Amino acid sequence: RAALDIKPEESYAQQRIDEIGNVLAQLSAAQKAYEDAVTEADREFRNESWEAAIAAYNTAKQAKANETYPDEQLAKIDSIVTTRERIAREEAEAEAARLAAIQAEKDKNYNDAIARADELFAAENYEESRNEYRAAQDIKPEELYPPQRIDEIDRILRELAAAQAAKEELDRKYANLIMQADRFFSANSFTPSKQNYTEALALKPEETYPKDKIAEIDRILEQRAIDEKYRNVIVVADGHFRTQSYDDARLQYEIALGVKPDEEYPKEQIRKIDAIRENERQQIAQEQANAEDLSRRRDQIAALEEELDEQRILEESGLNALYDQIIKKADGSFDIELYNVSRAWYYKAQDLKPEETYPPRRIAEINRILGEMMMSERDREYQRFIDLADESFRNNELAVARGWYNQALSQKDSENYPKEQLREIERRVAERVAGQSQQQFENFKTTATSAFEAGNYNVARFYYRKALELRSDDAEVKAKLQEIESMQ
């Protein structure tokens, strides 16, 4: 400017002034840009916004490259960042180590809890095992194994609780049944006692007590059955003995000995019967020698037979006549209410002519009437014995029939019918003992065979039956009767 004042016309000085003005203007703009950048950089530095501070300091350096402050600040930033990164890395490593230690401790505690839980589970200590699994779950909630095992334990405990409840109920029922069974046993009520022991054993098959008690009851009942059977047989035997049915009595006493071989009473009774029979045999021998007694028996036979001369029935017409006479006797007895006598005659008529419907119809009517008349237990027992006796008599089982007729008399000793039947049995027995039955049997059999060969089957059947009355075990007569039955 001074030079220009000297030589205003010179352009050089003005050019340099202009150039200096441009430079100053540039310097002023760079200073402002520098200062602004430093201001911003310092603010970001204070805020520890390192990347923004670094960028601002670099801008300041670009504005004024010779300034040292930005480089110093950049160095500080680098030192701070480096130090902090190191510290952060060291802290991270320490934290990682701490976390690793914590995780290792957690893993150890978890594994220990799982090991204890599994061991307790294997030992079926489910409550303690579940507590250990829950402890393991608290340590590692994210693990699936503990809750799975806890669920399994809960299921097992529910099942065990249900099983325990069922066992307790079973024990209760078993104890009740045993208590009832013992009470019945003490009262000698063995049948309900055995039933309760059996039900208890069904609940607990492994228990020995009910088995032992059942076996004991079976022994008692078996002995009772033996005693009862023995007693019943002895009652029947004594009944036969009292009514002098000695064959039947002896048979029953032998049956009693079969039931209880060590009993002395039946042996003594058999000895008595044998002695009585020996006396009877001696008496029979005397009777055989006694003509008057034999004559009297023959007179009785003739009186009983009355007009029924069966020996002269050789044709069907004679059989029909005999049938008509028997029906008249049956009807007559029926009309005067001698029903058992009437029924016996109807049975005879039925045996003569099985094809006739009238006798069985009347027999059924008599049975109905007798059933209605039997008001008392004594009446029923009497009629039951008569029915059994009549059936045995018709089957030629004379000893059995005699026993039943005597039983009927023990109920109603004033009845004539069983007495008459007993006399008829004695008559037949006397005939057999007297030795007359064999000839009569042969006569009946011969007559029957002649009628059979002549085709007169009803007459043949009549005489075969008569023969069978004398020899009930004759196989030939039985065969002939079966043959006649199959032909008609």
Image (spheres, helix red, strand yellow):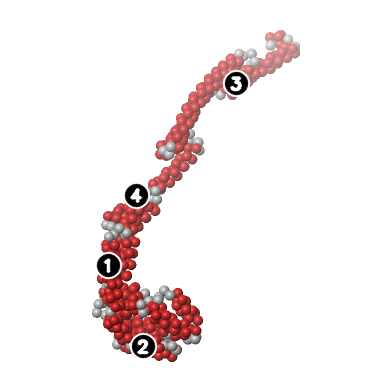
Looking at marks 4 and 1 on the same chain, the residue that comes earlier in the sequence is marked by: 4
**Label pair 3/2, CB-CB below 8 angstroms:** no
Q: Which mark is residue 308?
A: 2
The residues tagged by marks 3 and 2 sit, at their Cα atoms, a distance apart of: 162 Å
Q: Which mark is residue 376?
A: none
Front residue of 108/449: it is 449
On the rendered structure, is 214 left or right of 117? left
In the picture of the structure, the residue carrying the numbered disc 1 is 275
Task: Decide if residue 25 is in sight here.
Answer: no
Q: Amino acid at mark 2?
A: Leu
Q: Amino acid at mark 3?
A: Ile
Front residue of 81/372: it is 372
Residue 30 % position (x, y): 64, 18
Q: Secondary structure at mark 1?
A: helix
In the picture of the structure, the residue carrying the numbered disc 3 is 54
* Quarter of the figure with the N terminus: top right
Q: Which residue occupies 37% across, 89% down?
A: 325
Q: Residues within 10 Å of mark 4 (few under 14, many from 20)?
A: few
